[in-house]
């Protein structure tokens, strides 16, 4: 019999036989009380704990098995890992590993310039390359993930059609294994994958349409109608311009500015940034309730008509022949890193959305009704009511997503393998390769790297908690 089977058999024997003897010694049962006997037998551990530790000690007695398991499988490995980081050798047995002190940490910190991993020793180069890539990934991915989860939670918290369906769809990727997620996106993103096929077909179709006579006039009319409808929707309300329709109108303005390139008329670049600035300014004026917001939208509409007359749509939509892109292996393009951020956000957003949704539903609806009676703008209601009350939940999401982002491994290892080169090489992958993928595993070096990573995570987490509490106190 295996140790696990022996443990289960002993527990069952103690519970069944020992509990029956203990109950029969203390109470008497008739034949009619047999069901009561089995119910008492079911609660035997609680009664035993109460008799041994008293009523006040029962909660601690019930927590003891869980704490023993948690300590054995969590705290004990942490202590052993800390000890291993001060030892050398290739043996996995603690008794066969010689004590080397801080040698493994010194190998990691042997650098001429810590900001340049190439100046470090081989262990230091691998560790600091992985650490800098991980920090860059965390700084980009965590804000995007939290904002996307919050926006999604706000949307599915509204009284929209199919609300339960959309909640389930956003949460569905969380239930998938990281291996399944990586294989799905690898099929989508490789050179002959679904993304390249879809983009290629769309570009070929648009290029074919752009070559037809009269396409420029038809495209101009279509965009003019779209702008007219969107601007009318933005200005329809008597209480002020609509924020959501203004956002759509701003996106259209940014596209028109980018296509028309008005700054090129005076020999200056940067028309794309000008379009984004105009779109942002429009949304800011509406969301903050500025008095000139309505006139700004009307002026932007007049500007859009002028730009429509400047754009040659047959040239804009003539893309030429499409050459498939190796999204995950092309170096010095940023695409592998971008897709890692995208896939990670897509696969984990549903979990954090659910946490934020629970926080949103805990906010009393009376506050929003009072704000509506006072004709409060939606953006101001969000900033003054929703955000302060959701901040404790958002803090939990920030901390959990921060820790999970530092631990990224499965998606990277299966999608890019840390490449191309070392562009997506993360610190957890370095720990794994040092300990398990080398011909001569160095468990001490891997343990030292994991200790340093834990310190970095703790510093980020405590700083985040301190900053959030300070803002809530203000």
Image (cartoon, rainbow, N blue to C red):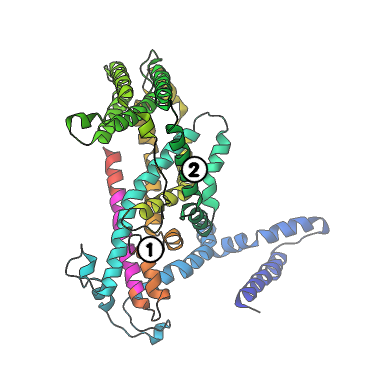
Picture coordinates of residue 69, whole percent (x, y): 51, 67
Q: Mark 1: give few (<14), some (14-19) or many (20+) Cα within 10 Å.
A: many
- Magenta region's main secondary structure? helix
Q: Earlier in the sequence, mark 2 or mark 1?
A: 2
Q: Quadrant of the C terminus?
A: top left
The residue furthest front is 213
Q: Nearer the viewer, residue 220 or 32?
A: 220
Q: Residue at x 82, y 55 (%)?
A: 32
Picture coordinates of residue 398, whole percent (x, y): 37, 48
55 is within the stretch colored magenta: no
Q: Secondary structure at mark 2?
A: helix
Q: Which residue is mark 2?
A: 201
Front of the two marks 2 and 1: 2
Q: Quadrant of the N terminus?
A: bottom right
Q: Is residue 357 visible?
A: yes
Q: Which residue is mark 1?
A: 418
Q: Secondary structure at mark 1?
A: loop
Q: Nearer the viewer, residue 31 or 252?
A: 252
Picture coordinates of residue 464, whole percent (x, y): 30, 49
Q: Quadrant of residue 380?
A: top left
**Residues in magenta?**
446-465
């Amino acid at each position: 019999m295996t140790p696990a089977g022996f443990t289960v058999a002993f527990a069952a024997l103690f519970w069944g036989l020992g509990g029956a003897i203990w109950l029969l010694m203390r109470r008497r049962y008739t034949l009619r009380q047999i069901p009561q006997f089995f119910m008492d037998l079911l609660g035997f551990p609680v009664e035993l704990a109460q008799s041994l530790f008293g009523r006040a000690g029962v909660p601690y007695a019930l927590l003891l098995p869980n704490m023993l398991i948690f300590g054995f499988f969590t705290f004990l490995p942490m202590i052993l890992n800390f000890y291993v980081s001060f030892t050398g050798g290739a043996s996995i047995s603690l008794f066969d590993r010689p004590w080397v002190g801080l040698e493994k940490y010194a190998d990691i910190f042997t650098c001429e310039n810590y900001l340049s991993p190439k100046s470090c020793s081989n262990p230091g180069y691998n560790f600091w390359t992985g650490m800098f890539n991980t920090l860059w990934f965390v700084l980009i991915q965590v804000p995007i993930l939290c904002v996307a989860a919050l926006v999604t939670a706000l949307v599915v918290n509204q009284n929209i059609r199919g609300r339960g369906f959309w909640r389930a769809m956003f949460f569905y990727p969380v239930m998938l294994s990281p291996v399944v997620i990586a294989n799905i996106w690898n099929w989508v993103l490789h050179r002959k994958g679904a993304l390249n096929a879809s983009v290629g077909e769309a570009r070929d179709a648009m290029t074919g349409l752009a070559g037809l006579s009269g396409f420029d006039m038809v495209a101009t009319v279509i965009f003019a109608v779209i702008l007219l409808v969107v601007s009318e929707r933005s200005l329809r309300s008597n209480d002020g311009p609509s924020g959501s329709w203004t956002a759509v109108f701003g996106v259209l303005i940014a596209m028109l500015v980018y296509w028309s390139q008005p700054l090129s008329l005076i020999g200056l670049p940067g028309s794309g940034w000008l379009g984004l600035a105009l779109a942002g300014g429009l949304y800011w004026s509406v969301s903050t309730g500025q008095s000139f917001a309505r006139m700004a939208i009307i002026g932007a509409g007049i500007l859009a008509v002028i730009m429509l007359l400047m754009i040659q749509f047959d040239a804009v939509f003539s893309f030429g022949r499409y050459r498939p892109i190796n999204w995950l292996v092309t170096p010095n393009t940023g695409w592998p890193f971008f897709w890692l951020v995208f896939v990670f956000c897509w696969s984990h957003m549903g979990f954090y959305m659910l946490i934020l949704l629970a926080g949103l539903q805990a906010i009393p609806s009376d506050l929003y009704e009072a704000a509506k009676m006072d004709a409060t703008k939606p953006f101001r209601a969000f900033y003054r009511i929703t955000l302060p009350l959701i901040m404790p939940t958002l803090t939990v999401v920030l901390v959990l997503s921060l820790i999970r982002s530092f631990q990224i491994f499965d998606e990277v290892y299966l999608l890019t393998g840390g490449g191309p080169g070392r562009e997506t090489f993360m610190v957890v992958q370095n720990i794994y390769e040092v300990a398990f993928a080398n011909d001569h595993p160095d468990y001490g070096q891997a343990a030292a790297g994991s200790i340093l990573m834990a310190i970095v995570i703790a510093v980020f987490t405590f700083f985040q908690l301190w900053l959030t509490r300070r803002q809530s106190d203000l």
